[in-house]
Image: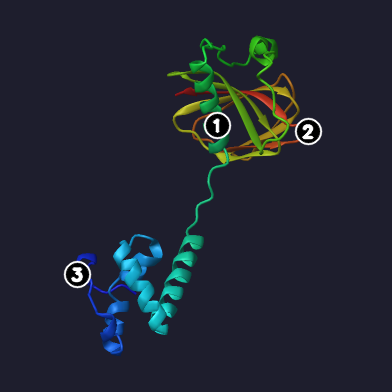
Amino acid sequence: MVSEVTSLERIKINVNRLDDMENLRDYIESGILESYVLGIASSEEVADVERMAERHKEILLEIDAISLAIEKFALENAVTPDPLIKPFVMASIDYMNRMMAGEEPSFPPVLNSFSVIKDYSQWLNRPDMVLPETFDNIYAKIIGYGPQGVTAITWIKEMAPQEMHDDEYESFLIVEGTCDIIIDGELNSLAPGDYLSIPLYKEHSVKVTSSQPCKVILQRLAA
């Protein structure tokens, strides 16, 4: 729909000359209508386009066609956002706010095959480390953060989507509820007290199998 005419060379056509179909086509192909639809036209251009659209049905139809084409392109190329991003961004903001309010940084122990739930009792028993009444699929409260990695109390209501890590080790210690963690097609059914470490470069996902959210100590450490 856009000709070789650049935005700086757009054809300036007087309203009174647009009765000529050739001039009308030049105006349509100048690129100004695309800029109008995308919201990047100047205020002068917007006023011009709206005046033209009132006088010329062809311009109004072209604006509709451009809008539909852009909408179709956006839908066809839409990327579903990672559902893990929002809860951990919110958890990071909450953690920073707690630090600014005077909370002292803490350093939870590194998860390993000998870890037990009581190792994290000082954080699990805090009155502010609770699940809100309503939340989306995943909710997290960071309890330790630093260059080495992050540790969080995390609740998963239904599932965590498939992902793979190439720069950090991810480990789980189940606190409440049950879940299945699938690593490269291998099923690992976990219950309270169970520990699992995810190897690098392995696709994995989580499916909650209990009626209650699965509460875990989640730790990601730099590889």
Identify which residue, 120 or 35, lies in the foreground.
Answer: 35
- Which is nearer the N-term, disc 3 or disc 1? 3
Q: In which quadrant will I find the N terminus? A: bottom left
Give coordinates of residue 168: x percent, y percent. 47, 27
The residue shown at (68%, 35%) is 135
Q: Amino acid at mark 3?
A: Glu
Please identify the quarter of the rendering in which residue 206 is found. top right
From the image, tell me which residue sits under label 3: 9
* Real-space Cα separation, disc 1 to disc 2, in angstroms: 25 Å
Indicate left or right for 87 with 158 as reference.
Answer: left
Secondary structure of residue under mark 1: helix
Disc 2: CA contacts within 10 A as few (<14), some (14-19) or many (>=20): some
Q: In which quadrant will I find the C terminus? A: top left
Disc 3: CA contacts within 10 A as few (<14), some (14-19) or many (>=20): few
Q: Amino acid at mark 2?
A: Ser
Secondary structure of residue under mark 2: loop
Secondary structure of residue under mark 3: helix
Residue at the extreme right: 211
Give coordinates of residue 195: x percent, y percent. 65, 21
From the image, tell me which residue sits under label 1: 90
Asked which colour scheme the image uses, the reply is rainbow
From the image, tell me which residue sits under label 2: 210
**From what the image shows, is residue 25 above or below residue 84?**
below
Give coordinates of residue 11: x percent, y percent. 22, 75
Identify which residue, 67 or 190, lies in the foreground.
Answer: 67
* Real-space Cα separation, disc 3 to disc 2, in angstroms: 64 Å
